Image (cartoon, rainbow, N blue to C red):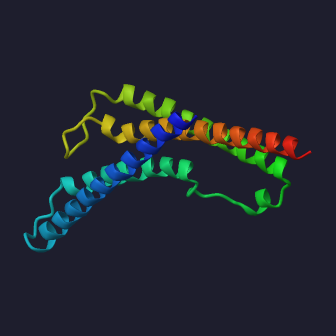
Amino acid sequence: MRLFSRLLDLLSQAVIAAAGVALVGLIAIMGWMVFGRYVLNDTPTWVERTATLAIVTIALPVAAVGVRERFHLAVLGFREALPERARWAVETASDVVVGLFGLAMAVWSWELIETSVGIRIPLLGISQVWTYLPITISGALIVLFSIEQVLLAYHHQRTAQRAGAYLE
């Protein structure tokens, strides 16, 4: 379990680092758009589509890391009011549902990739695959991070049960 978590640590750090680099690139692209529009009086046509693609490429993998780091949207009031065992069950069920959602993202966006291989994005000249690839990658990351959360919850539950048995 430790090795799996360590590998996912490295993966999530790589995703955040790549998103940081992509964010710097997005800022440069937006700066070029402003310069082109107001200084050159000629807005580059490729900038808006590239910026949209960059935002998707940044946001989706970082949202997947949010599943692991628990900084995603969650409603805690109900869960925190539950007894310990019920809280564990709700958290685990939530992680399983999120993992299934990630699996659906990965599978169905892969279908989009397969059907769009020969299609080019206008103004950019690159494959339409680049629009859907971040969805597939993010879905796969969500599945991995959800599996880790379920395994960690199970491990903590077992550890707590053993500790309780020793106290009795």
The outermost residue toward the left is 40
Q: Quadrant for the C terminus, please.
A: top right
Residue 108 vertical position relative to residue 51 in the rendered view, above or below: above
User: How many marks on residues?
Assistant: 0
Where 165 sits versus 36, above or below? above
Q: Is residue 105 left or right of residue 39?
A: right
Q: Is 9 placed above or below 109 here? A: below
- Residue in front for this viewpoint, 68 or 56: 68
For the N terminus, give its image quadrant: top right
Residue 154: name its quadrant: top right
Query: Which residue is at the front of the view, 21 or 102?
Result: 21
Percent position of residue 35, x then y? 13, 69
Q: Residue at x 44, y 27 (%)?
A: 111
Percent position of residue 91, x then y: 72, 47
Outermost residue, bottom side? 38
What's the residue at 19%, 52% (across, down)?
A: 46
Question: Does 38 sit left or right of 99 as displayed?
Answer: left
